[in-house]
Amino acid sequence: MADTYKTTREDAEWRALLTPEQYEVLRGHGTERPGSCALNHEKRAGVFRCVGCGQDLFRSKEKFESGTGWPSFFDPLPGSVATNRDTSWGMVRTEVHCSQCGGHLGHVFEDGPPPSRLRYCINGVALDFTPGESG
């Protein structure tokens, strides 16, 4: 990524910090298998954070069941994510990444519920969850 981020690490540091699956998603723009992450079923009040840098990304009250197999949210916390145009896999999508470390989180689509009508489809392995914090 050509952007400059507040949190940066050398590749070896990312590999030491993250599990192989987390590294593949956050640093390699991968995608976890749908339905494979327990956070998809997380219902408690709390905050979802970037597993790479700890930045708060989504509150649980913005999470909804999309039926896709990935945690889905209709709105991120202000300034917590940024987007890029993604033309991989022969389609045009909007990639979502952490604004603090640049880690790939997932994609955003325009088929979500009100009020935003957006669906932030996020890889669960890219997230940590802290229950009870302003969720």
Image: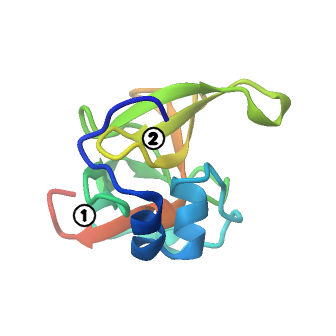
Residue type marked 2: His
Q: Residue furthest left?
A: 134
Asked if residue 86 is positioned above or below residue 47 in the image, the reply reads above
Q: Position of residue 82 (x, y in %)?
A: 40, 31
Q: Is residue 72 above or below residue 91?
A: below
Residue drawn at (61%, 53%), measured in percent from left and top?
Answer: 28
Residue 40 seen in the current view: no
Q: Which residue is mark 1?
A: 46
What colour scheme was applied to this rendering of the protein? rainbow
1 vs 2, front mark? 2
Q: Mark 2 packing: few (<14 Cα in 10 Å), some, or many (20+)?
A: many
- Residue 27 visible? The answer is yes
Number of numbered discs: 2
Q: Name the residue at the right extreme.
A: 90
Q: Say which of 30 and 79 sits in front.
A: 30
Give the x, y percent position of residue 71.
52, 57
Above or below for 135 versus 76: below
Looking at the rendered structure, the secondary structure element under dot 1 is: strand
Mark 1 surroundings within 10 Å by alpha-carbon count, few (fewer than 14), some (14 through 19), many (20 or more): some
Q: Position of residue 73 (x, y in %)?
A: 44, 45
Residue 21 position within the rendered picture, expressed as x and y whole percent measured from the top left: 59, 70
> From the viewer's perspective, is 20 left or right of 118?
right
Mark 1 or 2 closer to N-term? 1
Residue occupied by mark 2: 97
What residue do we see at 32% from left, 56% from top? Answer: 60
Quarter of the image with the C terminus in it:
bottom left
* Residue at horizontal 37 percent and vertical 60 percent from the top: 52
Specify the amino acid type for callout 1.
Gly
Asked which quadrant contains residue 89, the reply is top right
